[in-house]
Amino acid sequence: MPNNIAFYILAALTLCSAIAAMALRNMVHCALCAAGAFAGIALVFLHLDAEFAGLAQILVYVGAVAILVLFAVLLTRGEEIKANIRRASRSWFSGVCASALVFAGIIVPIAYSPGLKHTPAATASAPVQKLGESFVNEYVLPLEVLGLLLTAALLGAVVIAMQDKKEETKSISQPENHPVQKEAVQ
Amino acid sequence: MLGLGIIQGLIETGRNFVGSYFKPERLTTVQYPEERAKSFEASRTIPMLVYDGEDPNKGLRCTACTICEQECPPKCIYIVKDTVKKPDYLGKMQMQPKIFDIDISVCMGCGICAEVCPFESIKMDQVFELSTNDRFGSLLLHKHQLAKSNSYFNKICPTQAAEIDANRAADVHKAELKAKADAEAKAKAAAAATTNAAAGVAAAAAATVAAPKPAPAPAAAAPVSKPASAPVQQAKPTPSTPASPTPSADKKP
Amino acid sequence: MIENADQIFVILLHWLVGLVPEPWRPWLSYLLIIAAIMGVFGGLFAAATIAERKILGRIQNRYGPNRIKMFGIKTFGLIQPIADGIKMLIKEDIVPHAADKVVHYLAPIVLTTPIWMTFAVLPMGRNMTALDMDAGILFYFAMGSATELAVFMAGWSSHNKYSLLGSMRAIAQMISYEVPLVLSTIPVLMLAGTLSLTRVVDAQGGYLLGGFIPHWFILTPWGFAGCIIFLLAAMAESNRSPFDLPEGESEIIAGYLTEYSGFKYALFFLGEYVGMLAVSAMLVTLFLGGWHAPMKALEFIPSWIWFFGKTICVILLYIWSRATFPRIRLDQLLTFSWKFLVPLALANLVVAAVWHFTNGWATPLWASVRWLLCLFLIAVPFVLLGRSLDNKKQSPRLYHYAE
């Protein structure tokens, strides 16, 4: 019972944050509640003794992804922070059916997956070490592909940002384009 | 190389930190209410009226000429002349102010009044703790509040005060010499008048007696004038007295 | 006797916990540890504030605060933190009318909570780690990165242009300096072979040359470079001068702290200083040998005294550099992080790898060759990077006119 109650509390926290992230009017509040949901998931990981996963979840999701989402919200829809929720369909019944189907589609494979039948092995003495070893022995290809993907994303971001700057520099540095200097030249 | 400047900066501040415990120039704070910073001679805040001697009423140098009142740019000086006259340091009768008010909320500390005063009477003071409790009344300083003794003036402006005292002493000495010479001449004239009627021989004898008289007279006058000037200068501090023999020696006719 | 002095707090804890019946024991043990950590580091925080003010004062040719008296006795300003605490507590807590009240209230809490949690994994003496986690370093950095969200919350909820700008700049700075911070600790992990901080400290035990030179990581080429990078990145993470652009008073009023007064401001202030303490303690643990003594002869001094002594020395270094350097501009700050510290930290990784694989070179001749080789391998990128950033020709400034 004491073991489970912690899980129930954490699950309740995560679910409430996720629902709030969906339902709140103010976009920034939604993003902050999403960060709370990420923290809840991290706590569930930690509850299951998956230290590395939980802490990496906090480091990456709460520390970086949440900030990214917030920046995106502020820099794109800065003026209208309130979410204008437009209903896609009139009746709520079709919405419930759609969400039930999605939920079933996720839960059924998990419930019937063979991995769930295994009892978890006794926690290894150095799970982080085992994780590292498996990264470079068994799963080295996915690791390298992930690295490539991240590098591509970084390069893409730099290229997009650079392009904007180049256009601006080209257009402003020429005096013909500049209204005030144009008048001065004439 | 990168980083050398940083190390140099750290060494400099470290030196400041360690030096602040041993060297006074690396800890220049003056803890205000307990200590005050030394002010230098030329600093000035509001004017003051200098008086010689102990009694401000008798020794006040101001003669109510109202030049400072006329020259003051914001017109913060208010003078009313008195009908009673008093003698100044040379013995001449001068006027004196009945009312001498300065509004220090208006005074801008320019020092023009001190520059134009012909009697070395109004000088610039160095007090800065001038705040009062009420807004306007206490900031109008009256004659008794403005009067500061000459010894105070010497303390705050030593070289200027010493020069003024020396000049005044020389003036006193000159006046005394002149008085002595006048007295001598009068006595001489009186003696000549009394003996003239007696005999013509007495006039010739008086002429021969009068001739060597002027020669020892200045020599006799010099030691005579020194004890005479000494009581006048008793109020002034001793640094001025050694100064007086030398100007008087220079000013001997 | 020496053993007892060293383990005195552990013995005390066991004795106190033994006084209560069995089911309550873990709770009491955790509560006592938490109370002890908050008490000790709270006291260190107070001492750090007054030390900073007085040391800054002396460096700037003046006294620091020195007039506070307790019961009529002169205390030379040493109980000033008490006065500061009382002042913060009795100040009015003003919340702007248009501010987002919930987020405004939560921001200081979200800031200080993870920072207090970072102390759980630091080994403060022999057997004196509150929570010996397997992934201790990762826990530490995870908690450090959670504070960035609080900075954003503070800036945005104040409904003030300057706060928002300040918090954006603060977040940009913190994210930029996370990278060199973590990268500089990776050589330590590589060479200690573990993420657990207690084992990192254990790996720094032992002495060379007959007990005179300790095995601390700072005395290796990669450790020295890593320590400097960690120090600079940590200064930037805790918004400490010379990297205090987000909260510089002359720059942007108080940045994201503008609309905070009273106890909320005190919490931010506390968060900054306690963050500085946490990062100093981390530096000591990773590079300066944790609770180990520098010489075998000095081992009689208890381990926790060494730990706190070294932490205080690092804090003094922070205060010294605050007094010395001018504030760094935002573009200089970001250039420094991305174009200098990150490449240097990556080069440091290579050097650490070389050091690890030449571990077999034990004879004095080969050991010095190994040392010089690694030093050369880290000094060359350092000089080259420094040169490349120095001679940067300033491109003509771009002015974006409002059309």
Image: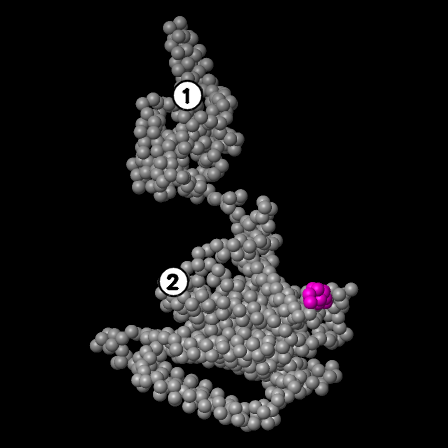
Asked if B250 appears above or below B87 in the picture, the reply is below
Residue holding disc 2: C96
Q: Is residue C15 magenta?
A: yes
* Percent coordinates x, y for residue C193 in the rendering: 65, 83
Disc nearest the viewer among 2 and 1? 2
What type is the residue that disc 1 sits on? Ala
Helix, strand or loop at mark 2: loop
* Percent coordinates x, y for residue C187 in the rendering: 61, 81
Q: Quadrant of residue C40?
A: bottom right
Cβ atoms under marks 2 and 1 closer than 8 Å: no
Residue holding disc 1: B179
Work out which residue is located at the far left of the displayed protein and give it. Answer: A186
Q: Quick one: C84 or B60, which is closer to the camera?
A: C84
Q: Residues within 10 Å of mark 1 (few under 14, many from 20)?
A: few
* Chain at numbered mark 1: B
Q: Is residue C184 visible?
A: no
What type is the residue that disc 2 sits on? Pro
Work out which residue is located at the far top of the displayed protein and give it. Answer: B198
Determine the residue positioned at 46% across, 68% down.
C107
* Percent coordinates x, y for residue C111 in the rendering: 50, 69
In screen coordinates, is B132 left or right of C303? left
Q: Which residues are magenta?
A: C7-21
Asked if B167 appears above or below C198 in the picture, the reply is above
